[in-house]
Amino acid sequence: MKYKLQFFYCIAIVFLAQNCTERGKGSSEYQDNGAPYYSLKDFETVKKFDTHIHFNYVDTCFIQQAEADGFYLVNITDDRPFGLPLKEQKIIAEQIEESFSSRITYATTFSTQNWEEEQWVDGAIAELDSAFSKGAKAVKVWKNIGMELKDRDGKFVMVDHPKLDRIWQYLAEKNIPVIGHNGEPKDCWLPLEEMTINGTRNYYSNHPEYHMYLHPEYPSYEDQIQARDNVLERNPDLTFIGAHLGSLEWSLDELSKRLDKYPNMAVDLSRMSNLQNHAMMDSQKTYEFFLKYQDRLLYGSDKIVGEPKNPSEMKKNLHNSWLSDWKFLATDDTMTSSGFEGEFKGLKLPKEVIDKIYFKNAKKWILGLDPEATI
């Protein structure tokens, strides 16, 4: 993607004015009617965070739909070796932060380029400091550490590499949360026929180069999780948010063990199909998991924002996707999922749990605010 920032900014503002003129319903405060549960009709008027969004384009219609649906957003940059380069991700993140700071914040990251250079750590910390001065509230660590980055001897660099220790200590001292995407879903290391979720099966069918079952020379799933756990063990003061259910989406028991062991760990819910599959297999256990860890769970969708070919259709699909997740968490309606076969019922979590998952926990874990603070 190539563009001049000033021109791009002007186009975005014009696009907002001309194409997204509706006033968002989510801008008003929710009026509590005293009922213990929310319903579908409450969706648009309850304040919410989506803590896992990737802006690859300043799509102001996406932002307008977020406002209409009552969402604040956390835009995440990452050091991926493909797609939009990190430099351009950061330009977009900073522009959105400047223009929409009342509704959108962002997580920065550090580049692993020049890893072998002696001054790499100093450069990475300077890179982070610059982003914090521009409004970044968190740091994303991506799976390239553990699954792509290698040292000069050709060995994979894991997230618990000693060279990264200073960065974790620095972030802990500054009370900056780390959002960690470490490893992949466990399906990635399984044969196609043993995978749980259709989406992962389809993806790895089409991208065998990323299907770790076919690449035993790469670190194992257990290696990835252990490396992440080693970081948490050595840095108990580090605030850590495990992206995608901490890559423990396959087992509520294994995820519970980590949440019990590491009190400064939370997770986002951006593998919703796995949670729905858990609900189908054991609804009561899934419900009890949400109740027990209601202070440690943050709603996130992992939506990728590109230039929309049809803005109206994009807004409709976005609304329906967000509403479907709300339906699963807030109601006990019978549902189906494209991720797997079978019916399941929504969890119908109490209002106070929904409020934490969708709003209060993001204020605490990402913004560092009192959960009851007004924003």
Image (cartoon, grey):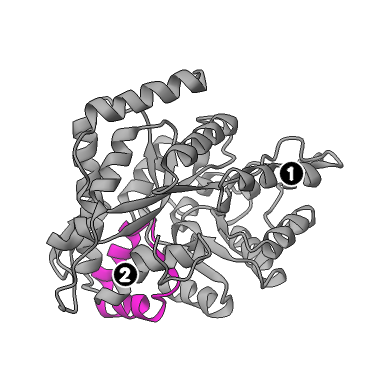
Q: In the image, what residue occupies the spot 54% across and 29% down?
A: 88
Please, what secondary structure does the residue beneath circle 2 have?
helix
Magenta stretch: dominant SS?
helix
Residue at 30% x, 30% y is 16
Q: Quadrant of residue 161?
A: bottom right
Q: Quadrant of residue 45?
A: bottom left
Mark 1, Cα crowd under 10 Å, few <14 / some 14-19 / many 20+, is few
Q: Is residue 244 left or right of residue 86?
A: left
Residue at image position (16%, 71%) is 332
Residue 218 in view, yes or no:
no
The residue nearer to you, when weighing 148 against 202, is 148
- Residue 170 in view, yes or no: yes
Instruction: Work out whether 247 lies above or below 133.
Output: below
Instruction: Name which residue type carries label 2.
Output: Asp
Report crowding for label 2: few under 14, some 14 to 19, many 20 or more residues within 10 A (C-alpha): some
279 is higher (above) or lower (below) than 131: below
Describe the element under mark 1 as helix, strand or loop: helix
Alpha-carbon span between mark 2 and mark 1: 36 Å
Say which residue appears at 53% left-offset and 34% top-offset.
89
Residue 224: image x %, image y %? 61, 58
Of the image marks 2 and 1, the number of the one nearer the N terminus: 1
Residue 35: percent from the left, percent from the top? 15, 78
Magenta highlight on residue 301: no
* Magenta-drawn segment: 269-298
- Residue 208 place in picture, x, y as percent: 47, 38
The disc label shown at residue 355, or none? 2
| Residue closer to the observer: 323 or 18 | 18
Q: Quadrant of the C terminus?
A: bottom left
Disc 1 residue type (three-letter) = Ala
Q: Which disc is residue 126 wearing?
A: 1
Relative image position of residue 32 (x, y in whole percent): 19, 72
